[in-house]
Image (cartoon, helix red, strand yellow):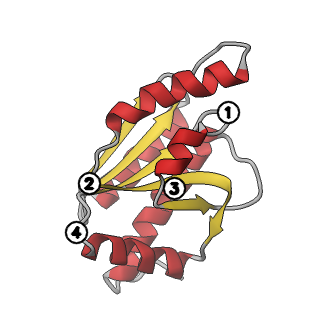
Amino acid sequence: MIKIICVGKIKEKYFKDAIAEYLKRLSKYTKINIIEVDDDSSNDENLILCNERNRIIPHIQKKDYIITLEIEGEEFDSLSLAKKIESILTLGYGNITFIIGGSHGLHEEIKEKANLHLSFSKLTFPHQMFRVLLLEQIYRSFKINNNEAYHK
């Protein structure tokens, strides 16, 4: 199963529609669970990171292969990401858990739990748009791994 833990909620209908479309497409390959935790509106960045950490941690299980999404993370092309996802699934982890932080990123304790720190780019994306990009790349990975047309 794939879990995506996200800080913040999707408000825009067009993002909700795109997410729903990729969830429908992915249902052919895997169960997927999106867990939204509340973001924090404090003025103290450290407090925000701590509060968001406290909301994320209960959703992480010992059997999860944790992938944090970070600008400083390792970059993959789509073929390499597909191979990585395939190898994780064959290792017997219960879940592949992707974690998308809030506007201040992720608390160090969450980063330390990660098996992989993944970056899609050095660019900064809106969190709503990034969730769609992540789902699309997960879908692309399953299509690649099943030798199905879509990738090119």
Identify the residue at image location x=35%, y=78%. 87
Q: Position of residue 113 (x, y in %)?
A: 46, 49
In the depicted structure, whether residue 63 falls above or below residue 129: below
| Lower sequence index among marks 3 and 2 | 2
- Residue designated by label 2: 63
Q: Position of residue 70 (x, y in %)?
A: 63, 52
Identify the residue at image location x=65%, y=39%. 105
> What type is the residue that disc 4 sits on?
Gly
25 vs 77, left or right, is left
Crowding at mark 4 (Cα within 10 Å: few <14, some 14-19, many 20+): few
- 95 vs 9, nearest the viewer: 95
> What type is the residue that disc 1 sits on?
Ser
- Residue designated by label 1: 103
| Lower sequence index among marks 3 and 1 | 1
| Lower sequence index among marks 4 and 2 | 2
Q: In the orientation shown, which residue stands out farthest toward the top? A: 42
- Residue designated by label 4: 92
